[in-house]
Image (spheres, helix red, strand yellow):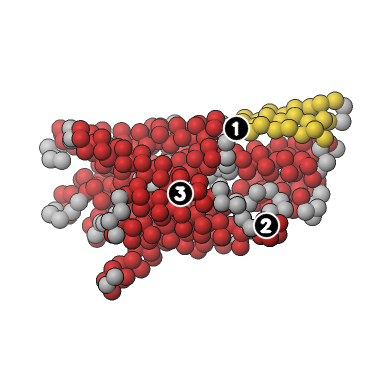
Amino acid sequence: MDLHFVGSSVLQFCVAMVATICFSLAFQVPRRHFVACGIAGAVGWVVYFIGTAAGLSVPAATLVAALPLTGVSRFFAITRRAPVTLFLLCGIFPLVPGAGIYYTAYYLLNNEQLLFASKGVETLKTAVALAMGIAIVCSIPLPRKISRKQYRGPKMN
Amino acid sequence: MTDRAIELVVEAGKAMLENGSEVFRAQDTMEIMAHSLGIQDFHVYVLTNGIFASAEGEDGPISAVRHVPRVSIHLGRVEAVNAISREVAAGKLDMEGAEKALREARAIPAYGPRVSLLAGAVGSGCFAFLFGGAGPEVVTAFCAGIVEMLIMQLFHKGGVSKVFTDIAAAAACTALALAAGNLWGMGYNPSGAIIGALMVLTPGVALTMGIRDIINADYLSGTIRLFDALLCAGCLACGVALTYMMAVSFWRITL
């Protein structure tokens, strides 16, 4: 791991954070949670960035990135006493396969059936991987102590 | 008294749903509030776009049905209603207090249109960078972000359907990104800019919520949302494709 890669990772982290904060604004998240949302999104994106740089495929990297992202979101949900949706919805946005949708349409137009099919399947796989990553972490039960202290009211996670 | 309590609980559930909460959260919140307010025999079934509840009222059983046709995401309000139900459960809020708090929660203002415009534009620019764009792509995505946010706000105000809004916004940002090619010349990759601008429109919310609903065994609600996501993705692809086709035939742009 050379210095250049570390530098670009840090840059990616910062830009992803700004992008996620823009989304939390679009979803009307209260201002006090902006930084937490930004961190959740940036963590997910940096893991994805490192994963793809290490040679993982896009769906695999998305799955790997969704795990810490959801973990961080749950952590913020407990410490900041807010529904986990707040952090999760904003945080996953960098990982949503927008590029996949675009390239699928692009190859369809170009009459490159093979690339179209493979891109389409990859996009679908990425979406499912993202969802599974979230589902796995969301269904991990919390230790009794935390859940009793925090979860008296409605479900927060 | 009980009738008012039922009204309060169902309205709280409706407020959560129409501001973009998950189905199971709305259901949990309503059940807990009903329990804390001492409503007898409270049963509720929540769907993505509707609430069906029944309970034992003062004179015989009563039922309450709410239709939630249009969801616009406002997570601040979801958080506020969630907090109300927690306070009710903890006994910190009585019914009058809860009714007042709910009214206040529903009136939490949204950010102004100019701020949203800027957020959309900056977000587009950032995503263009994250997907490997350099200076020209980021600037183009920023401009495309402004255009698509303007279209979305204008169409939303005019009551245009979501399908058409998505297609139009995707088409506009593709057209702008392609047209910018004349300005930047060589070394400019329109795909980077288009992807950046497109990210703002992607159905990330519907996708995640759909899966979360399915994981919580709300298969019907989850399917509704997943289809929503699929439709939205299809609209984006359609908008991009239409613009490309027009560009190829009218402006002789080579793909």
Q: Is residue A52 visible?
A: yes
Q: Position of residue B23 (x, y in %)?
A: 60, 38
In the rendered image, the quadrant that contains the N terminus of chain A is bottom left
Looking at the rendered structure, the secondary structure element under dot 1 is: strand
Identified by mark 1, the residue type is Leu
Q: Give coordinates of residue B147: x percent, y percent.
A: 34, 46
Q: Give whichever of A11, A141 is nearer the camera.
A: A141
Q: Is residue B4 left or right of residue B222?
A: right
In the rendered view, would you say B142 is above or below A98?
below
Residues marked 1 and 3, same chain: no
Q: Is residue B223 left or right of residue B84?
A: left
Q: Quadrant of residue A42?
A: bottom left
In the rendered image, residues at marks 1 and 2 fall on the same chain: no
Residue assigned mark 2:
A144
The residue carrying mark 3 is: A133
Label 3 is found on which chain of the structure? Answer: A
Q: Position of residue B226 (x, y in %)?
A: 46, 35
Residue that label 1 marks: B47
CA gap between label 1 and label 2 equals: 30 Å
Mark 3: few/some/many CA within 10 Å (<14, 14-19, 20+): some
CA distance separating discs 1 and 3: 24 Å
